[in-house]
Image (spheres, rainbow, N blue to C red):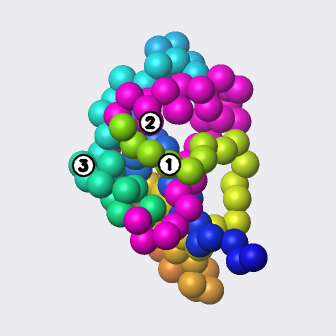
Amino acid sequence: MTQPRRVTLDFDGVLNTQRTQAEDDDPAAPIPDPPTAGAREAVAQLRAMGFQVVVHSARTSEAPRALDAMEAWLKEHDIHVDAVVREKLPSDLYVDDKGFRFEGDWPAVLSFVAAGLEPWNR
């Protein structure tokens, strides 16, 4: 049996707008930010295309309960994914607001870093 194709989405800055910091910088606190425009529809479309959609976030390494907060947020905003995980899984695509597609060109990486590392929403 073949494994389904998988897309892994970062949580903060990709699915949610990450406009605010969690109270007391607690990554497990309830998440007040709304979804990014089109997130719900895009996730539904990826799943309709046959992809397994997985959500991953660095916040889960900071607080064990962060996974619960993320799952509650997804449910609140009616965004249906296949899994929310603590560890990075092998995937066909990783979508991250702080990512860079490496294509074997280290000078391009260094140029990207030198240009600044602000996420799209800041």
Quick check: 7 above or below 25? below
Q: Residue furthest left?
A: 37
Helix, strand, or loop for circle 2? helix
Residue located 70% across and 36% down the image = 61
Say which quarter of the image contains residue 77: top left
Q: Which residue is mark 1?
A: 81
Which residue in the protein does label 3 denote? 37
| Image quarter hosting the N terminus | bottom right
Q: CA distance from mark 2 to mark 3?
A: 14 Å
Q: Which stretch appears magenta?
A: 48-77
Q: Residue at x 43, y 32 (%)?
A: 75
In the displayed structure image, the side of residue 6 where residue 75 appears, left or right: left
The image shows residue 73, relative to residue 9, as above or below, that is above
Q: Dot 3, crowdedness within 10 Å: few (<14), some or many (≥20)? A: few
**Residue 20 is one of the magenta-drawn residues:** no
Does residue 115 show up? no
For badge 2, the amino acid type reads Leu
Of discs 3 and 1, which sits in the foreground? 1
What residue appears at the point 49 percent right and 44 percent down from the top-left corner?
Answer: 11
- In the rendered structure, does residue 59 fall within the stretch colored magenta? yes
Going from N to C along the chain, the mark reached first, 3 or 1, is: 3
Q: Which residue is mark 2?
A: 74
Please name the amino acid that badge 3 sits on: Ala
- Labelled pair 1, 2 in contact (Cβ < 8 Å): yes
**Quick one: SS at disc 1?**
loop
